[in-house]
């Protein structure tokens, strides 16, 4: 019996899926890796490969299979994020063992930082290190993602409303990333390791319920499997594949649309698109075309809100103004064409094209000149939202808070000061103010989740109606800790009001009753929010140029 037929043998579960164990699981991993390697295009197929090794069962089983199939052609990279005690020793031990066995292996220490929360920052740092570690410019990087990881990714994207691209999940080949195990279950990689006597370790973060993905893995997916009689993970992975096929068709249609919509003069420095040509296409194709066009122009960090506003310049054109984009750019429609312009804030001549240098008058200095990439929420929008939240809060607390039972606002220093004072002045009920200071951000651009009290409340809150006033909810780790701490002090009620929330960055579910704005996972400053103690005094919410914190 050949290896491929042996791979197909095994117990059939109640969901119809094969459950391979022992030697069969090890064979299944090898067959999956062989098939993936054979599909690689040249020159990636003949380049030496790099395997990303974490020490877990998935990457350990993957490495064993690759070493069997490509003896002498395998390099290994172990990325140490430094987020756990003993991670350096763990990474060093893995590499030392491989080197002693004749496998080229190195540890790559990274420091996760930047916008989007600690998990997103760690992922960016890890992928950058792996890309740089390739032994050859065409080398594929093999990752140990399984069908379970794919199902979790799709379910997470569905729950967060992240769009069809997120629901497409991970591709088997997305240069330079190769994921051979996407058709195998996590239990099969563990069985493969056990059959071959390969030691592996379980990352404590993979069982930490503070993280949303962990709760999906251990609570939501098992419940769905039970309620729907199995097969949910496979169905989610299958859905991802179907959506990926649809996405590729839409991408092809979008590229064809761009060819038609580009202005006849290919040397046009403003990179204009013909609005009438775009208007003839369905909105789904049009938005993909706009995303591709903007990405080619160097515009990153685009959210669904950005793209829909950009599409409105075509599909819902009514003479409206331009759309503010990241990197201090505006997308405008003029004379039937869409063009990118340098943003009108701060102090830039809006009439100049993107490619033209707009000199600022020397007699009009601008605060933080050149630091602000884009304005996400204007001063007027902030003011209107504060008034709206004050009306909502005031209505809810009108009967509960009067006289000695004034509503107690608890602000988290320093970021919430601007929002809290403006909210307090706008509230139609009497309030009292308290402040806490906790350490979590420092000078980095993402929340670590490590919290310590720098300043505690000056009074007892037992029996009081307490409203926590936050400037922004990022990962939710700090707020989760704060809620537990204040709940232990027995207030009559405890609610949360935040000006900003990043849904895509949240890793811990926390109850938030009042939310001003949901924003993309970008690092923002202004209206109390800072980077390294600067920019708090800006009257709007904006993003920084990457050069500021790079």
Image (tube, grey):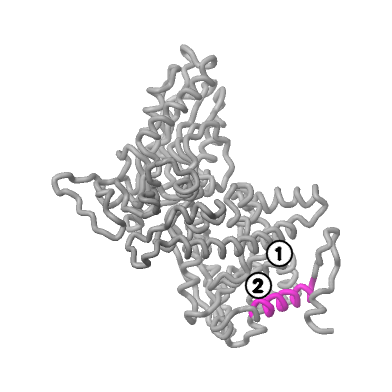
Residue name at image x 65 percent, y 72 percent = 180
- Residue 325 placement (x, y as % from top left): 40, 50
Q: Locate residue 396: give its quadrant.
A: top right
Range shown magenta: 21-37
In the rendered image, is residue 44 in sight?
Answer: yes
Q: Is residue 115 above or below residue 80?
A: above
Residue 186's tag is: 1
Residue 180's tag is: 2
Q: How many marks?
A: 2
Q: Residues within 10 Å of mark 2 (few under 14, many from 20)?
A: many
Residue 60's tag is: none
Residue name at image x 68 percent, y 61 percent = 242
In the rendered image, is residue 100 in sight?
Answer: no
- Residue 83 placement (x, y as % from top left): 50, 58
Looking at the image, which residue sits at the far bottom? 72
From the viewer's perspective, is 52 left or right of 448? right
């Amino acid at each position: 019996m050949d290896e491929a037929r042996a791979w197909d043998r095994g117990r059939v579960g109640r969901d119809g899926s094969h459950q391979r164990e022992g030697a069969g699981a090890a064979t299944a991993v090898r067959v999956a890796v062989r098939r993936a390697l054979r599909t690689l295009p040249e020159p990636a197929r003949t380049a030496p490969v790099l395997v990303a090794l974490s020490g877990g069962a998935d990457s350990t089983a993957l490495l064993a299979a690759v070493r069997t199939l490509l003896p002498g052609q395998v390099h290994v990279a172990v990325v140490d994020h430094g987020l756990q005690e003993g991670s350096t020793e763990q990474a060093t031990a893995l590499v030392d063992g491989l080197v002693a066995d004749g496998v080229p292996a190195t540890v790559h220490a990274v420091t996760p930082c930047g916008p989007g929360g600690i998990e997103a920052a760690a992922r960016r740092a890890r992928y950058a290190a792996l890309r740089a570690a390739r032994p050859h410019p065409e080398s594929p990087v093999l990752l140990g993602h399984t069908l379970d990881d794919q199902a979790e990714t799709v379910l997470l994207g569905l729950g967060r409303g992240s769009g069809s691209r997120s629901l497409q999940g991970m591709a088997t080949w997305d240069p330079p990333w190769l994921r051979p195990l996407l058709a195998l279950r996590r239990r099969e990689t563990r069985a493969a390791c056990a059959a071959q006597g390969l030691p592996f370790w379980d990352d404590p973060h993979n069982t930490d319920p503070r993280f949303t993905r962990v709760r999906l893995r251990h609570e939501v997916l098992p419940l769905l499997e039970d309620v729907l009689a199995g097969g949910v993970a496979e169905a989610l992975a299958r859905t991802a594949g179907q959506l990926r096929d649809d996405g590729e068709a839409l991408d092809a249609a979008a590229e064809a649309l761009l060819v038609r919509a580009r202005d006849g003069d290919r040397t046009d420095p403003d990179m204009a698109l013909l609005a009438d040509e775009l208007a003839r296409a369905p909105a789904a194709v049009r938005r993909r075309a706009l995303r591709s066009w903007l990405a080619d122009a160097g515009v990153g960090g685009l959210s669904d809100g950005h793209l829909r506003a950009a599409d409105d310049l075509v599909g819902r054109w009514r003479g409206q103004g331009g759309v503010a984009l990241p990197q201090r750019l505006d997308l405008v429609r003029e004379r039937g064409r869409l063009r990118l312009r340098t943003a009108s804030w701060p102090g830039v001549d809006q009439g100049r094209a993107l490619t033209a240098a707009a000199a600022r008058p020397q007699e009009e200095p601008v605060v933080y000149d050149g630091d602000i990439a884009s304005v996400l929420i204007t001063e007027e929008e902030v003011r209107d939202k504060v008034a709206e939240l004050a009306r909502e809060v005031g209505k809810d607390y009108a009967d509960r808070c009067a006289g000695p039972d004034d509503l107690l606002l608890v602000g988290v220093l320093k970021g919430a000061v601007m929002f809290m004072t403006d909210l307090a002045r706008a509230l139609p009920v009497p309030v009292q103010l308290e402040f806490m200071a906790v350490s979590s951000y420092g000078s980095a651009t993402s929340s670590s989740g490590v919290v310590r009290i720098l300043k505690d409340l000056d009074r007892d809150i037992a029996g009081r109606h307490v409203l926590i006033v936050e400037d922004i909810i990022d990962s939710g780790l700090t707020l989760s800790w704060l809620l537990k701490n204040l709940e232990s002090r027995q207030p009559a009620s405890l609610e949360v009001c935040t000006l900003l929330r990043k849904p895509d960055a949240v890793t811990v579910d926390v109850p938030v009753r009042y939310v001003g704005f949901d924003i993309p996972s970008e690092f923002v400053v202004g209206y109390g929010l800072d980077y390294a103690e600067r920019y708090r005094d800006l009257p709007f919410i904006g993003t920084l140029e990457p050069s500021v914190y790079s």
